[in-house]
Amino acid sequence: MGLLESLRNSFSRRSDASHARGDKEDLFDDDFQRKLDYLAIVSRRVFAGRMRAERRTKKTGSGVEFADHREYQPGDDFRYLDWNVYQRFDKLLLRLFEEEEDLAIYLIVDASGSMAFGGGDKLRYAKRVCAALAYVGLANLDRVCIVSTSDRVMMRMAETRGKARIFKVFRFLRELESAGTTDLGDALKTFVAQHKRRGLAVLISDLYDPQGFERGINVLRYNKFDPFVVHIVDKTEEKPKLFGDVLLYDCETGDEREVTVTPKVLARFREEYEKYIHDIDRFCATRQVPYVRADVSVAFDELILRVFRRGGFLR
Amino acid sequence: MIFAGLGFAQLAAIFGVVGAAVVGLYVLRLRRRTVAIPFSPLWQKILKDKDATTLFSRLKRLLSLLLQLALLALLVFALGDPRAAATLVKGRTLVVLVDASASMQATDVSPNRLEVAKNEVKAMIRGLGGADRMLIAQMDAMVTPLGPMSGDTSELERALDQVKATDARADFPRALRFATDTLRNVELGEIVVVSDGNLGPPLDASGPVHLGDDKLSFVSVGTGKRNVGITQFSVRRYPLDKSRYEVMLEVTNTGPEQQDIELSLLGDGNVVDLTKLRLMPGERLPRFYPNLSGASRTLEAKLANVDGTHDDLPADDHAYALLPERRRAKVLVVSEGNTYLEAALLLDEYLEVTQVSPTDYVNKQAGGSGFDVVVFDRVTPASPPKAHALYLDPRGPGSPVKVDTELTAPGFDKIDRKHPIVRFTALDDVNVAHGHKLVPDLAAGDKVVGAFGGTSPILVAGSRGAYKFVAVGFDVRDSDLPLRVAWPLFLLNTVNFFTDEDARYISSFRTGDVWRVPVSTQATEATLALPGGGTERVPVHEGRAVYLGERAGFYELTAGDSAATPEQPSPINGANKTAFAANLLDAEESTIAPVPELVVDGKTAGKVEGFHVGVRREIWIYLLLAAVLLTALEWATYHRRITV
């Protein structure tokens, strides 16, 4: 029996079992979750945390792993005096231990209208990625917070920790629906204002931002969050099935434009699309922002287990 | 250029209406399909460049509209059936007479002459000029136009398919008169005869046929000459022994070579006689088969070559005949006793004679109902019997004819020798002691068969209601008639006359003649079952079904109502049904040697010319082809995004 299955059983004793089964079926299967049990999120930087978890921080304290000595000062806890040193050197030194803290992981899901384009594959995929990351974070006793954005912060799931809260994540994501235009800059400004505690900010988006995808990422960077970009792409958008006289309209803004689509036009569109993807990749690389491109046509578990590991997100 | 189809005003109206619809639909088509995209800025740069080509795109769209309007113009123009005025004026009017006589069934060419003739006509149809018009008529015992005068090839080919072979000879003069009548006052009229040429002289009761200005062309069909046919076939029963019959037939070799043949005679499907014959070229060989027995109904003569092969014309290798059906006639004799009468009636075993006294007749026989014939010997009933009746020396008010003054030593000074009751008899020198003058009712159709001195009828035949009668104005015992051969013949002739079992029975009809088959019905129509299966309704006129038969074989005629009513006597072949046979029996038609040239009205028919397969003068066909090509062009340019 998988871990989630046992969790689900314990959960079902307190709540509606069928409801929990529905959540599970929407997002993960048992095999997939068993694999995720062995993964943990690593942060490229050590964050200060409020609760002890499996991350080492700069802070020394009551952990079990020795870190350093410092001179005793009045008021220090006698229990941490290193009596062996005092016996040898006649100095009162206090033993310092590395404190293990929890990590704040912010999963920012773009829920703008473009994410629902093409049957909603991108949003569905983003939800799964978000759920997987949330599960891994919760399993490592990290503090996980999920935020959905469009041109503003739309919904927010309060910070939570512990694997038992995964169903809360599922419920939150299930209720998440796409709407509105994309303005990551404004939305993330609101986000950083609402979340004082810094941490890992995973932006899951198709980055179709008319104002420029850079603004949102820069907001995170400038406010000392550790941004991680998961770029959701749908290859069918690169090769739209268009021919002849059509009236194009933007599914977010509603802007309309007449165009006669010919093979030549389609080829030029592909060039533009690839250039846009390349610009994002180059931007993230030059700013040292971890970037993973998640193609909805790639099998979901393959993305989580192989692509994320290769991208340094999982260890 | 003229329009043979719709007029210019109609075409303009159609083009206007449909053109407006096309433009309207085109405008609707210009409403673009709305397609959602996820991120419009990606398209911005492309669309900026695209703006520069908008004018060119509009021009291309206009080209598409123009293509469609051109397509419409072609179709509308085709509806008008435009033709060059010159070609219309010079169009020929052709009457094609396709010979469907028996000789056209000859198989000297494959599959037979008629099919080859049809192929020839089909080639002519496909080579018709755009302004030419043609009428196809089948020429056999009559002439039958198979369709209207038309230039439409499919319609003409459908008409040609209706040509069917017959077993009759062709009535060439009638066909020519039909053709000349059809072409009267028509310019460039042409009669095309497609035949083996064995048509006989173009001469009928009205004299020779004149062609006038019409051109005559002839297509000769056939190559072979080898044929032996049955040219005569007749059969009859012996009057006094109807179980036996005699057959006369004639076989003719119309070919140029000596032929060894095998002649079979079949009675009811069984071989009655088989003879091997050798016929020299042109020889006519009559054969007589007397005193045959073993067949009760059908007779068939068949010819085959000794080596088992068939000659070129199988149609005349068979001949059919029907013997008159033998049926026991029920005869009631009302007499106090007449040995001569009883003895004569015993001669025919097919008579079922019942004799009663006059008293028993009144008490028991109820007017002779149930009998075919009642013979009143010196007795005259108060009311006429319900059967045919022979009155010997009638008297009193019950007599069918008035009995007038007594005659002393009358004789048959005047005899209607064509009447069936006196057939084969010699009554001129019959001696009669005394008799009575009979007064026939001429208004009722009575006929004087025998008269004394020219003015005193002593033998009268006629009918009262549905029943015939014969009245003899003397007692046969007062004459030497019973001592003569004529007496039993007279009696049997009379019974046969009553029952229609006539010695003149026609064993078979000839194809190509109008048959008048007697039927016993008041109906105006009868149903004729044909030899090859199928039925036809034929009119009945004055008691005879009239039909022009063209197929050899056995026929069965059913009168309008299915069962005979009590008032209607049973006809010869049973209740309202008459069977008969028909044969070709035509030596000229059996002569199948093709004639190389045809001469009519002093003109020799020329060869058929002016038919060029594949060249059509109808412009509309080319217009339609152009429309199809244009459609293909539009389709290709549209799908290759050239005109979008």
Image (cartoon, coloured by chain):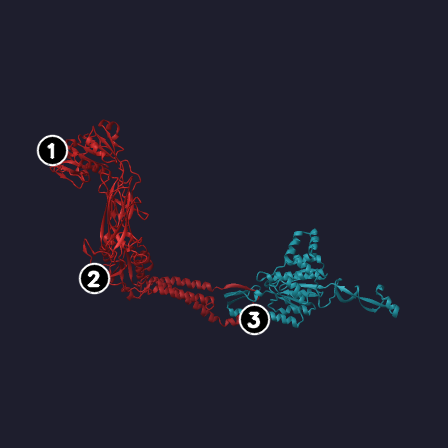
Chain colours: A cyan, B red
Number of other residues with Cα within 10 Å of mark 3, as a class: few under 14, some 14 to 19, many 20 or more: few
User: Which amino acid is tagged 3?
Assistant: Glu
Number of other residues with Cα within 10 Å of mark 1, as a class: few under 14, some 14 to 19, many 20 or more: few
Q: For mark 1, what is the residue?
A: B409
Where is residue A299, by image quadrant?
bottom right
Q: Is residue B273 above or below residue A58?
A: above
User: Which amino acid is tagged 1?
Assistant: Ala
In depth, the one of A308 and A75 nearer the eye is: A308
Q: Position of residue B461 (x, y in %)?
A: 19, 37
Where is residue B355, by image quadrant?
top left
Q: Position of residue A22 (x, y in %)?
A: 64, 54
Q: Residue at x 49, y 64 (%)?
A: B32
Q: For mark 2, what is the residue?
A: B603
Cα separation, mark 1 vs mark 2, equals 70 Å
Left or right: B12, with B50 as reference point: left
Q: Nearer the viewer, mark 1 or mark 3?
A: 1
Q: Quadrant of the N terminus of chain B?
A: bottom left
Q: Nearer the viewer, mark 1 or mark 2?
A: 1
User: Which amino acid is tagged 2?
Assistant: Lys
In depth, the one of B255 and B314 nearer the eye is: B255
Dot 1: element: loop
Q: Chain ID for label 3? A: A
In depth, the one of A137 and A115 nearer the eye is: A137
Q: Is residue B204 above or below residue B24?
A: above
